[in-house]
Amino acid sequence: MRTVYLGTSDFAVTVLERLASTEHRPVLVISRPDRPSGRGRKLHAPPVAQSARAQGIELDQPEDVNSDEARRRIAAAKPEAVLICAFGALLKEPLLSVHPMLNVHPSLLPRWRGAAPIARAIEAGDRVTGVSIMRPTAEMDAGPVCLQREEPIYPGDDYGSLWPRLATLGADLLIEALEAWPECVEQSDEGVTIAPKIEASDRRLDLSLAPLELERRVRALNPHVGTFVEMPDGGRLGVSAAAVPAGNDGGDRSAEPESPGPVARDHVTPEPAAPEPGRLAASGERLFYGCAGGALELLEVKPAGGRAMDAAAWLRGHGAALAGER
């Protein structure tokens, strides 16, 4: 089948590369424009743009995919289907209605419509997620679903371990949909949840949250975005792995976000320490952060401008300072 593919992120690269190995190989890839990133703020092409060039697929990077020029470019490719995966921009009319379209969305719609479904599922303590193949509409991720399949969220999963499995599943389901064109069924109005994009404020481990909530946030935002605690001197200490000490999850779980099934068993360690909220404290070679109702153990940290290291290594250079604070 003659296809055009719209995508931007690493997740979309996995789907594109699988698609390109089939008879549905795209004749045109549309990605977002190059953007400055990194310390030098140099222009970098999105992962999908890099992949398309490497595979010799024609590429376009319009500022606005809904513009007349961009729509003419897509129409000139004469697609039998336009495929969307992690594109990062809303499609509008008349583009939505001109071509048959399928979108790869990494959640079990209608749960987690929006920009960050993988992270929000981990953060909420969901035990299962999945991928939906749906027909896009003007309302965000609200179109009818053609195929859907589950993927478990394991107790130790973070974003970095979960997204590749969902991307592989998404590629398989997209190809299955292209070959069978199953009937699309309207989503239920019940069970709708929204997965808002990750904001800068989400990265900070809020001392007013319980350890269980913070541990999930660490897993939800690592390694792609990162999380941190604020130091007493105003600096930041990155946190890339954490655990909930046994019996130190904050007590009342009634305020936890609702989950579609039993909550996953989160990473729990024994022998909690209880520093004051917002303070770091050491217990031997273990590092703890005080928060609402208890403490979060920091397993792997990243000093500003430095590399990630286990807590014991960080304490060898900073343990004396922590002891002095007490």
Image (cartoon, rainbow, N blue to C red):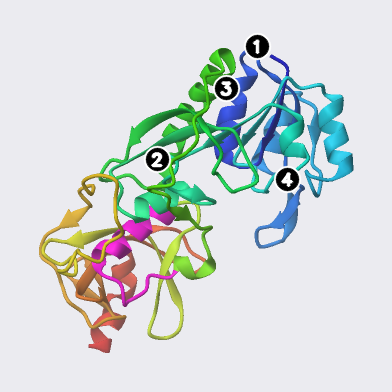
Work out how far the residue at label 4 is from the one at label 2, CA to CA, in angstroms: 30 Å
Q: Residues within 10 Å of mark 2 (few under 14, many from 20)?
A: many
Work out how far the residue at label 1 is from the one at label 2, CA to CA, in angstroms: 28 Å
Task: Name the residue that disc number 3 marks.
Answer: 18
Q: Which residue type carries mark 2? A: Leu
**N-term-proximal mark, 1 vs 3:** 3
Q: Which residue type carries mark 1? A: Glu
Question: Contact (CB < 8 A) between labels 1 and 2?
Answer: no
Magenta highlight on residue 215: yes
Task: Name the residue that disc number 1 marks.
Answer: 23
Asked if residue 147 is positioned above or below residue 310 in the image, the reply reads above
Question: Contact (CB < 8 A) between labels 1 and 3?
Answer: no
Work out how far the residue at label 2 is from the one at label 3, CA to CA, in angstroms: 18 Å
What is the span of residues highlighted in magenta in the rendered image?
204-222
Between marks 4 and 2 in the image, the one whose residue lies nearer the viewer: 4
Task: Name the residue that disc number 2 marks.
Answer: 162
Question: Contact (CB < 8 A) between labels 2 and 3?
Answer: no
What mark, if any, has residue 281 been given in the picture? none
Image quadrant where residue 287 sits: bottom left
**Lateral position of residue 83 relative to residue 28, left or right:** left
Between marks 4 and 3 in the image, the one whose residue lies nearer the viewer: 4
What mark, if any, has residue 92 been given in the picture? 4
**N-term-proximal mark, 2 vs 3:** 3
Work out how far the residue at label 4 is from the one at label 1, CA to CA, in angstroms: 28 Å
**Lateral position of residue 59 relative to residue 127, left or right:** right
